[in-house]
């Protein structure tokens, strides 16, 4: 199951890179608990419960707020029913023109081929500075 979990998470990042949000949402459990990093610019609605909340509270805000926003996984680590991703966020904030290039860690909890929990860690100060 671990290899399948890593493959599924790799596929989510590939879908994000293509802008295929429906493919991402289809792999989220209907009761997924999505947590943005504490003090992150989109943590104001934590926890996001369910794919619709993630779509509206995270993905749509990213599209509205950022130009060329990317999530680049550098390592995807197998931890059984958890998958940990180490990588980089990059983009330019539309209103301020300030660029971000920040390290990130994502911890995915998986069950029955779906993501049931997501926890993000990143450089929250860099993002806060970029939007002001």
Image: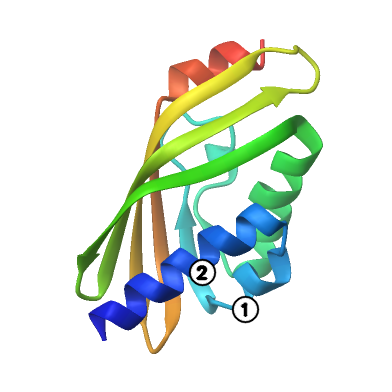
Q: Is residue 118 above or below residue 63?
A: below
Q: Nearer the viewer, mark 1 or mark 2?
A: 2
- Please give the label number shown on residue 26: 1
Left or right of 78 in this view: 9: right
Q: Are marks 1 and 2 in contact (CB under 8 Å)?
A: no
Q: Could you say where residue 20 lies in the image, as x and y percent from the top left?
A: 71, 64
Q: Quadrant of the N terminus?
A: bottom left
Depth order, front residue of 56/44:
56
Residue placed under numbered mark 2 in the picture: 11
Q: Earlier along the polypeptide chain: callout 1 or callout 2? A: 2
| Mark 1 secondary-structure assignment | loop
Left or right of 59 in this view: 80: left
Left or right of 23 in this view: 95: right
Q: Is residue 98 above or below residue 12?
A: above
Picture residue at 75% right of the left edge, 13% below the top: 97
Q: Could you say where residue 82 lies in the image, as x and y percent from the top left?
A: 26, 68
Depth order, front residue of 121/102:
102
- Indicate the quadrant where residue 21 lies: bottom right
Depth order, front residue of 80/61:
80
Q: Could you say where residue 81 lies in the image, as x and y percent from the top left?
A: 25, 75
Q: Is residue 91 above or below residue 9?
A: above
Q: Is residue 117 above or below residue 72?
A: below
Picture residue at 53% right of the left edge, 65% below the top: 12
Picture residue at 75% right of the left edge, 49% below the top: 60
Picture residue at 53% right of the left edge, 44% below the top: 71
């Amino acid at each position: 199951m671990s290899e399948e979990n890593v493959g599924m998470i790799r596929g989510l990042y590939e879908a994000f890179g293509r802008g295929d949000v429906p493919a991402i949402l289809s792999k989220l459990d209907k009761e997924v608990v999505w947590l943005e990093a504490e003090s992150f610019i989109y943590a104001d609605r934590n926890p996001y419960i369910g794919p619709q909340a993630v779509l509206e509270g995270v993905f749509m805000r990213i599209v509205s707020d950022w130009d060329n926003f990317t999530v680049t996984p550098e390592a995807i680590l197998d931890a059984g029913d958890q998958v940990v991703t180490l990588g980089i966020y990059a983009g330019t904030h539309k209103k301020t023109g300030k660029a971000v290039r920040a390290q990130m860690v994502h911890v995915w909890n998986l069950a029955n081929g779906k993501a049931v929990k997501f926890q993000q860690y990143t450089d929250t100060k860099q993002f806060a500075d970029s939007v002001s």
